[in-house]
Amino acid sequence: MAARWSSENVVVEFRDAQATAMSVDCLGQHAVLSGRRFLYVVNLETPSEAPRKISRQSKWDVGTVQWNPHKTEAHLFAASSNQRVDLYVWRDGSGEAHTSLQGHTRVISDLDWSWFDPELLVTSSVDTYIYIWDTRDTRKPTVALSAVAGASQVKWNRRNHYCLASSHDGDVRIWDKRKPNTAVEYVAAHLSKIHGLDWHPDNEYILATSSQDNSVRFWDYRQPRKYLDILSCQVPVWKARYTPFSNGLVTVMVPQLRRENSLLLWSTLELNSPVHAFVGHDDVVLEFQWRPQKEGSKDCQLVTWSRDQTLRIWRVDPQLQKLCCANDIMDELMEGLTLTTETEKTLRSQDSEPPLSPGFTADNSQEQFDGPQSGLSSSGKNDVPGLPQTLQQEFSLVNLQIRNVNVEMDAVNRSCFVSADCGANRVRLVVKFPAQYPNNAAPSFQFVSPTNISSSMKTKIQKILTDTSLQKVKRNQNCLEPCVRQLVSCLESDGVMEDGTNPYVLTNPVTPALPAFPRVSNTYGSYQDSNIPFPRTSGARFCGTGSLVYFTRPMTMHRMAPQTEPTPRSLSALSAYHSGVLTPMKMRTESQTTLRLYSGSPTRTDKDQVSISSFYYKERKPPLSTPRRWSVQTIHDCPKSRRWKGKREGGDYSSRPIKLSGKVIIQEISCLLPVHKALGETYVLNVNDIQDTCQKNGAAALAVGRRDLAKVWALASAATNVDLSPDPDPDAGTPWAKHPFGRHLLETLLEHYSHMSDVQSLAMLCSVFRGHGSPQEYFTLYGHQQPRPAIFTAYHSRYPSITSSSVTSGSCSSTSESANTPWNMVGRESEHAPPWGESSPVDYCYSNQIYTDPREREKEQHDMNKRLLDPSNSWQFDDFKKCYGEILHRWGMKDKRAEVLKFVSCPPEPHKGIEFGVYCCHCRSQARGTQCAVCKRFTFQCAICHVAVRGSSNFCLSCGHGGHTSHMMDWFRSQEVCPTGCGCHCLLQSTF
Amino acid sequence: MVSVINTVDTSHEDMIHDAQMDYYGTRLATCSSDRSVKIFDVKNGGQILVADLRGHEGPVWQVAWAHPMYGNILASCSYDRKVIIWKEENGTWDKMYEYTGHDSSVNSVCWGPYDFGLILACGSSDGAISVLTCSGDGHWDIKKINNAHTIGCNAVSWAPAVVPGTLIEQPTGQKPNYIKRFVSGGCDNLVKLWKEEDGQWKEDQKLEAHSDWVRDVGWAPSIGLPTSTIASCSQDGRVFIWTCDDPAGNTWTAKLLHKFNDVVWHVSWSITGNILAVSGGDNKVTLWKESVDGQWACISDVNKGQGAVTSITDSQQNEQ
């Protein structure tokens, strides 16, 4: 089966060819590849032989090359090069250019030999002329068709001697060579540039155009206003060409985008999804041509040339050819196939019968097939390429293996009945499809009993369904499956919100028992996967602070591809490595509504599915050829490999399932990092005794072997010596910070540790020197002359005590009146200056401008100069501390983190204060102040004096009673239970 | 010394695509082609399976732990076009949110710095990047950058919340006004930088150097230095280190770290931002460190398929 589907049987690489164009001769013997320096003629019978070369001298690439399609002239081929066409003769294994056709004044865009007259060749150019040449008279063209617009493609009709078509941007013109002055017909085919043009092989009036606008359109040029059919792709289409067998079409996407390296085979009768993808090229396909069938062989061969510099020949056998025919024929065909595997049988049955609908009886399924089927075959006879989608097809192909959902479909009445149960929610929905569906006509949705969801939910679902369906039918796509899926997800998300339980968990336990083997794997489609990156099978990540987590592919798995070949880029490469292979049938079932080939059903357990592991060869033999792997390796894997060996020797190895997942290894790499967890623990930050701090830290650094840090701490100790502490008087001399061993030394140290990324040392140094400077400086900065209250020596740091901030913010209005704490005074005292705790040196810079007295300014300048840490960098120093704080947090040292973060100059957002909200005890509405706005009664009465409380209050969090603080204090001095008599032991309940 | 502290047998039924430990390094999350996400408790060298999360319908490509200040939250992205955010509550893991706004495989998820709240960037093969922000009441606000990378986006990585260069101009007493930024890499061979302005995501920079799909990007954590650093790796085997000293963030210079023989899939920075782990299709892991003079040197090598990371310094010591 592999040969049948992934039917590439020849791959030849011509690494140096750099060919831009390719052509296959009419005898099927040779292909010519046109590179810049040589033309290579490949013998298709023995393609691996070195190709014969014809050298050419031109600085231009070959634009188009084409063999003469007539057997009598089969030795002749034409190659366009800029403004010229060279005619080459190939005889007896060597070739030469024998004549040139010159006439065009701009680059030639396309050329085509006549199908009827072996001497005639047509060329198109951007110079707006289309010339028809007679090779017997090469001096000038015999006919010149004037198009006014430059042409990108020109093609002779295959049935009519005189007819040819050219494309000009988005338009197509049909010419009769006998009437060169004007085109016979104009077709405004596309909105964007047409890249490819191809005449129907059998019908004289029909042609296919492929365009930048992401579509292929089929035209009968007698009806130029409306295309016969359209194939919507999601990317620009480079070429779309009919196949030599009936009803087939092959497309390639625009090479410039490097997006799609597969060729797709379509049935023109069924344009919803491709019949087959030719997957294998690693880069864009530049050219593809059919090799004429050999006599007696039913196979067709497709020859492709890609920018990956490989020529591939793909066999398309009769089965695949017939897939391009209508469905009924295909069923017949599948019936006759004896080779069909189990998987495909199930797939086929899914394809021909509506899946999973218990309510579906045999009768109406019969009806369903009878009705539209006749329409299907009649439209097939009309010789119209492409077939409109029918409801019956949608029903038969739709994938509705959705949890909790049952869909009964009735194609005759154009309706279906959807029943979904999700937790307690039940939804019954009748969907009716209008006759025009899905061509811009959306189905209607109606709820029927016993639907039990709320009306708001109904409205919501209705809206979602309408939106979803409109979205699809606007693009003429089917919408049943997306609608049903939307319905289910909507119900499930609602279920989560309403009753707090996840219906997903209820219906499907989180850890369902899985069959050990065969594994539940995923289906990869091939079509869209080309832009999904190839999955990682190994990776390493730094985690936490000092760990490296990594996983690699198990060593028993080797790549199927040779080591020298790079790992593929995209996921689509997988299908080439898979033996069971994606059947077109599977592609059809799963890609009904969109072009994406993705299975939505997690229940699928096909054995023959593609997985990433398919790319890797699972080793079943001992790797004798590579004994190195056994001898060299390392500590932790030894037990594993020994075990593995043992199994192999024990002989039961082959019966064991191969492990597809490797181990995840966690490695301790903290020794590579500049930060030390041990130091994080032992470092101290005591601002009251900087000297001691430095000495202790120096000892700690020595203990972990960081001698450099020990020295740094010694230096820090020296620099913070009391002898060097600055004099508040500017006239007393230059402060130590201005000395080379002052600020400069510190800056050099910081720079050094910045280079080492040693954020631990950086943060500690910054904290110590900031702590060193701060106690005195804060006072000089804000002009406090009097000795500081004792409380400040305890709370030395940037963070004011909790109390002072809450008092100064003053938003606890209810307590302020009777506040009798000593802290309040502190708050008042500092009112004339910004609260000291919340200012930073930066503050100071800004407030600088308001001072006018030069002595003041000098003093400030002096204050700045006194600091060992340059105040202008304080933000950076803060970042060091924050970053180190984060690392300490990861180490779980929350206290240490808080210690470091105290030195951050940018405080956390100023506390806005907490306001207690009061609910009126009578009407339960929220009240402000003492009187309730709603019931006009006092919101909160004192339990003792029964007066409305304003100001300081206390109440029990358990029973809610309370009153004026003073009253409460008096009461509870002697009592334990609530003064209201509710029996609550308020003191015990409100222990905090 | 570099040493293996744990070897976790995940028992995934198919290949593993990502493994990541949480903030504290106590739990390990892995995801696989078998459609599951598993969480292991790996404290003290043990391995206890805490949860086996089922919900994806395709291979799961990547996992990401959120900052623990928001609880134990894990995001996962998959081929099935979904992003699922899982949350542990009372010891059980459940879906917290499921995002289905992408039209193709979601290849990368990355949580933003905690300063920005619970914010997740997702890159998908449909070319779009979604930024999901939790508004606190369980609702998620979604901003989508359509066509961020033509063909597809393969990786996203957030910038640390720092304001390099603009330190002094900050108004006082307020929290610095961090700009949300992230970097992405895609199939258009580009590395793009994005930043949020007035609530809208805008393309800030476009970095060109790779000649094939960019497979991963990593914005180095900041320790407070003014330089921003990004690593990017690609199908073309190259790893670039991008640095920017410019406070405005406009001039980025690329430096080639190394050209590998096979695709490079992943780059990861150490917490101090001075060591880079590189892994790729050759099944090897290498560690790179910048020397004081700014040169990058390989300091380790993982032996093929099964080896431990042996630091070169270690092996040298052993030889002596």
Image: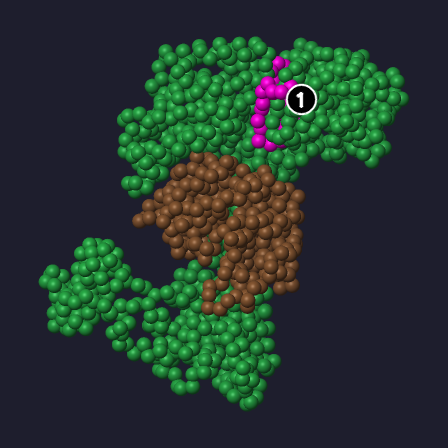
Residue A261 pos. (x, y %) = 62, 31
**Residue lying at 65% horizontally and 53% vertically, measured from the top left:** B254
Number of residue marks:
1
Residue B214 rendering spot, x and y as whole percentages: 60, 44
Check disc 1 and report its element: helix, strand or loop.
strand
Q: Is residue B296 above or below residue A623?
A: below
- Residue A388 percent across, percent down from the top left: 53, 18
Residue drawn at the location 58% of the way across and 73% of the way down:
A747
Q: Residue A579 occupies which quadrant of the picture?
A: top right
- Is residue B36 toward the left or the right of residue A269 in the image? left
Question: Is residue B51 found left or right of A767 in the rendered image?
Answer: left
Q: Quadrant of residue A601?
A: top left
Foreground residue among A578 and A308: A308
Way the structure is coloured: by chain
Mark 1 belongs to which amino acid? Val
Q: Residue at x 55, y 56 (%)?
A: B220
The segment highlighted magenta reads A224-252
Q: Colour of chain B?
A: brown
Considering only vertical position in the picture, is B66 above or below A453? below
Q: Quadrant of the N terminus of chain A?
A: top right
Image-based side of A814 in relation to A563, left or right: left
Chain A, hue in figure: green
Q: Is residue A413 magenta?
A: no
- Mark 1 belongs to which subunit? A
**Label 1, on which residue?**
A187
Q: A238 left or right of B100?
A: right
Residue A43 visible? The answer is no
| Residue situated in front as seen by the camera: A930 or B153 | A930
Instruction: Report the residue at 70% width, 16% height from top.
Output: A292
* Image location (x, y in percent) of residue A126: 77, 30
In reply to whether residue A236 is colored magenta, the answer given is yes
Query: Residue B41: in sight, yes or no?
Result: yes
